[in-house]
Amino acid sequence: MNRKKILVRGPAMSLSGYGEQCRFALRALRAYEDVFDIYLVNIGWGETGFITEDDEERSWLDATLKKTIEYMQANPENRFDMSLQVTIPNEWDNLAPVNVGYTAGIETTKISPEWVQKSLEMDRIIVTSQHSKFGFDNTVYQAQNPQTGEVVPVKCNVPVEAVNYCTREVSAQKIDLKLDYEFNFLTMAQYGPRKNLDNTIRWFVEAFREQEVGLVVKAFTKTNSIIDRTYTEKRLQNLLSQYEDRKCKVYLVHGSMSTQELHGLYENKKIKALINLSHGEGFGLPMFEAAQSGLPIIAPAWSGHCDFLYGPVKNKKTKKVKVRPLFARVEYSMAPVQPEAVWNSVIQADSMWCYPQEKSYKSVLQEVVKDYSRFTGQARRLKKHIENTFTPENQYKQFAEFTFGQEIKRISKENLPKISVITSVYNGDEFIKPFMEDMTKQTIFDQCELIMVNANSPGNEEDVIREYMEKYDNIIYKKLEEDPGIYGTWNEALKLSTGEYITNANLDDRKAYNSLELHAKELFTNPEIDLVYADSFITNKPNETYESNSSNGRRYNFEQFSKQAMLRGNQPHNNPMWRQELHEKHGEFNDQYKSAGDWEFFLRCTSGGSKFKKINDVLGLYYFNPKGISTNFENYTWKQQEEQEIYTNYKEKLENEAVVVQPVPAKNSAKPQSSRQAQK
């Protein structure tokens, strides 16, 4: 299948819940890069800060943002196959032929009329929990038909899927909080009506006024700035000033924290349980992360976090397994949202959410302290349930398939046949080491054989090649006593090949890290196709990489395969992969040609009934080498004659089935994929 160009629009760089939600979505899509060609537009998210981790994911985000800008600037008419929009529904828009909305949903009992209207503009909607899904599926409003006056029900009628977050392997970074007591609770929240933070702190102090127990409050009001810390600290001090004569202690943690530092909080030996006393959660990521770390959870049994805080428990006597709460439940009542929480077009004034009960909360806190071993046992069962159920493999698959719109049948890399990569070595000292680095980092290089034939080059490429042969036993090297030309060299490489699929790799060009894999999978899933090819970015600078280059989005947009297109030019160019059977049916490359022998071979195959297919993707980097055979202006005359001869030979064979336009080679035109470096 051709990869879908998907535009992800969301707060990918934001240090917020929605930011992490966006990054989860991108991880899920990246797990299926053979299905999705990912582009990214970052949006702001309130006044939250930005992620600071300098890791592989951040580098990928930066590269994808750059790739998107270059793609859109290269041609304003460039379009995407689909969009994934990670934000509140008010901001969803028609960005592509297929649009998927992804939101945390609503923490109340119903969504707004604006959300219902926006949902109808989406093809599919993904939410983070069954609670959010319920809001979309069950909210109904009455509307009047302006033409007939009839009152009709209006609701979201597009498919809605709940996809939970997944577990992550995180190394906790130890944090010295300088806690005075051995038993401390942790709560994490932004100051605001929904999080119910004042009551969380106030009722804790009242419950432990005479006890040596602590509460760590990881909180902020708007941002993680110094000004915000001062404001948040004063707000907390004003609340605690009402309880001056107390033994229990409250600590404020403020500021940006890495994922490793947050897990350092969850795994701190003096922190015994996480409290969440909010009125509702779209999912409850801190609770999920804390539960995965084995920390007991205290919360009301309402809204998004119920998806993961319940788990299977086997009855010791009956051996029956039932789903039970694996957390300390706080009783609650349902009531309309507070007036200050009403948010026009988002949180409805007539919607409801939960109100945790003060008496129950205080009782649960005391019970956790007195009977802590019971709750740690419960937490261990919950940790096991989360790790077994919410795996990246499960959650990414569910997310990717719903986004795609159908089941994705994965092709295991191990099932792909062996690939022979043929390379002509001549005057390549400048390119050889970067080329070897580029090839050996291919995702399926261990399933390939790299066949390098030295056409009696005057250079010292052999030293580098043998250095890599010591590291990789799938590199085959042969040096010829004389130069038979590019196509004679390729034919020598074909004699050494044992792969079912064949591709060439030029010393001065580069490939996407998964180029070979994507080409091979396209051939594997299309048995009627004999050759596949893809576009390439174009650069004028040597030894750049696919991931970092100066193409600025400039690329070859090759035509879809047809006999007419093949007569107009060499569509496979520098990015083909073909079945070895083509040589059994149609012979070797014609070594009388110096520049266009690959075009002649592909025309020979086409006239013999072979079928090619374009992969609608950019999977290579083409270096416009001024010393290359077909890009050196000094070669223009004979190159034009060669191409004219080939065109004339095949025009007559194919013109009965094709309306053709005779090619006119442009001066300094781009080389075909068969070119190599400066010749003798």
Image: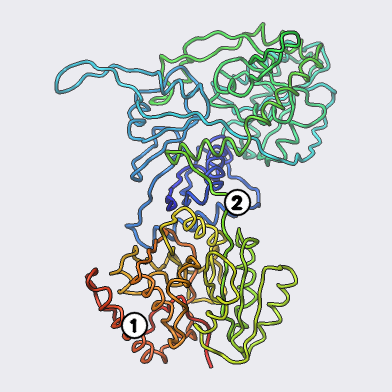
Residue in view at x 81 percent, y 11 percent: 370
Q: In which quarter of the image is residue 396?
A: top right
Measured as percent of width and height from the top left, residue 507 is found at: 56, 77
Residue type indicated by callout 2? Arg
Looking at the image, the residue that sits furthest to the left is 147
Measured as percent of width and height from the top left, residue 128 is found at: 52, 29
Mark 1 → mark 2, Cα distance in angstroms:
49 Å
Name the residue carrying label 1.
646
Measured as percent of width and height from the top left, residue 493 is found at: 57, 77
Q: Nearer the viewer, residue 545 or 525?
A: 525
Residue in view at x 33 percent, y 44 percent: 97
**Number of marks present in the image shown:** 2
Q: Does residue 444 appear left or right of residue 384 in this picture?
A: left
631 in relation to 370, above or below:
below
Name the residue carrying label 2.
58
Q: Nearer the viewer, residue 345 or 397?
A: 397
Q: Quadrant of residue 614?
A: bottom left
Q: Does residue 528 appear left or right of residue 194 in this picture?
A: left
